[in-house]
Amino acid sequence: MVGNQVNGARIILVIEYDGTNYHGSQLQNNARTVQGEIEKALKMLTGETIRIKTASRTDSGVHARGQVVSFGTNAVLPLKSFIDGLNHYLPHDVAVKEAFETPEPFDVIRRAVSREYRYYILNDRTRSPIRQGFAWRVTGNLDIEAMNQACRALIGRHDFASFVSSAETARRKRTVRDVFEAEITQDGDMIIFRMVANAFLPHQVRNTVGSLVKVGQGKMTADEFRNMIDARTPGLAGPTAPAEGLCLIRVNYPGPFEGDAQ
Amino acid sequence: MVGNQVNGARIILVIEYDGTNYHGSQLQNNARTVQGEIEKALKMLTGETIRIKTASRTDSGVHARGQVVSFGTNAVLPLKSFIDGLNHYLPHDVAVKEAFETPEPFDVIRRAVSREYRYYILNDRTRSPIRQGFAWRVTGNLDIEAMNQACRALIGRHDFASFVSSAETARRKRTVRDVFEAEITQDGDMIIFRMVANAFLPHQVRNTVGSLVKVGQGKMTADEFRNMIDARTPGLAGPTAPAEGLCLIRVNYPGPFEGDAQ
């Protein structure tokens, strides 16, 4: 907790990572995590033991284009040096893309108004050496129109209890979420599911994708998808789509961080 | 040459590969090549020693979405088994996407009417863990309009001697090529150069990209780019952009192969 007690600078970083070789975003003992790598790089750069806070927790194998983390430090460095210095120490599969300084404490979790995730489905009969690792390959025809019809049922304030994997999770968490956007687009053989919500339940996007693919395959109708939401029964949605297709695109805040971007 | 002498089936495959860990498409002693891996997989699948022919030679580190190869075989197998069987034996970074059978000999090199390459430039100040390996990262502003103006000078029949790296290469080869399309498009921070020509000289796309980036950076005008083409002087274009940004998208034939796609 050293990092949160300093009187020095409060720094916010936008981070990109290939999650393939990570046990998720959050610190764990004896496992390689994004948080662990960033804290190690911060130690190298500043000499301080710094604990970072992460805006949107990602699971093992999930990627991020625009994860947001924050920390406090007594290091006196231009923002540009946080970017280039950390990128020097970070492994090739994690990078700092932007840095901001905030004059006041800024809670990157609570101040976030929404998170955007995308899930990539490669609709191809054979494996793809170029796209592997960043998409779930699903063979056979998918009815994009039906999938989009199901997506519309997601939009708005709903109790998403059906989209958590276990009753235990549903008991521990409030399961109501505000979904602002949910849509499927297609770019050649790549099908992209985009979902923006105030916050997400564990495995929510991946369980949503598992059910949407069922709709695309004609195994579930858009109406049955809507009924599944209304049922508010943990474990109903799914199967959980693989982690590798999921990417945290960005975390949205009401205004700019109170500082200058570099 | 065993493969070309058989009286059995003549097979054409469309191949995708991540070229990062290959010393190019063409067979070499003591080096991992795409041809070497495909011939090894063919040996596993058919028991035969087969020599394949490759439609568009790619250099070390260059990728392909739609390379085309052909071979003859006495193996009696449905086309689907050439796809799935070879994909079983091939390493994860090479895959067969389609298979065709031709009743008559079909020269995949000479019958090709054009090749399409794309070169990916990531215009970003910091490295990208998600896109690395498939793009050349160039920092600083690039004038896309000026680059596109230069592209227009490429279209048509020209002597592209200025785009080969050495006088030796220019002596060995006819350097006139027909360029059907050349354009720059932008998708966020990714700049994509697309070029379609009847055939390409060694390093032609990468030397073209090196010069186009100079135009984008204001170090060369579109007129100077045009004069460089007209000069027909080996070594004038460049620098040679890195291999990792280049991808062979497809090889075009006048009609369908005389066989059924799988």
Image (cartoon, coloured by chain):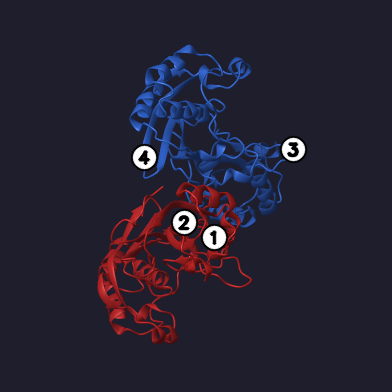
Chain colours: A red, B blue
- Residue A19 against residue A88 in the figure, above or below: below
Point out the frontmost of discs 4 and 3. 4
The answer to which of B201 and A216 lies nearer the viewer is B201
The answer to which of A243 and A218 lies nearer the viewer is A243
The answer to which of B166 and A141 lies nearer the viewer is B166
In space, the residues marked 3 and 2 are separated at their CA atoms by 42 Å
The kind of residue tagged 3 is Asn
The answer to which of B41 and B103 lies nearer the viewer is B41
In space, the residues marked 4 and 3 are separated at their CA atoms by 40 Å
The kind of residue tagged 4 is Gln
- Residue A137 against residue B63 in the figure, above or below: below
The x, y position of residue B162, in whole percent, is 51, 18
Instruction: Give the label on residue B186, or none.
Output: 4
The kind of residue tagged 2 is Ile
The residue that label 1 is drawn on is A38
- Do the numbered discs 3 and 2 sit on residues whose CB atoms are within 8 Å? no
In space, the residues marked 1 and 2 are separated at their CA atoms by 9 Å
In space, the residues marked 1 and 4 are separated at their CA atoms by 31 Å
Q: Are marks 3 and 1 on the same chain?
A: no
Secondary structure beneath dot 3 equals loop
Q: Chain of mark 1?
A: A
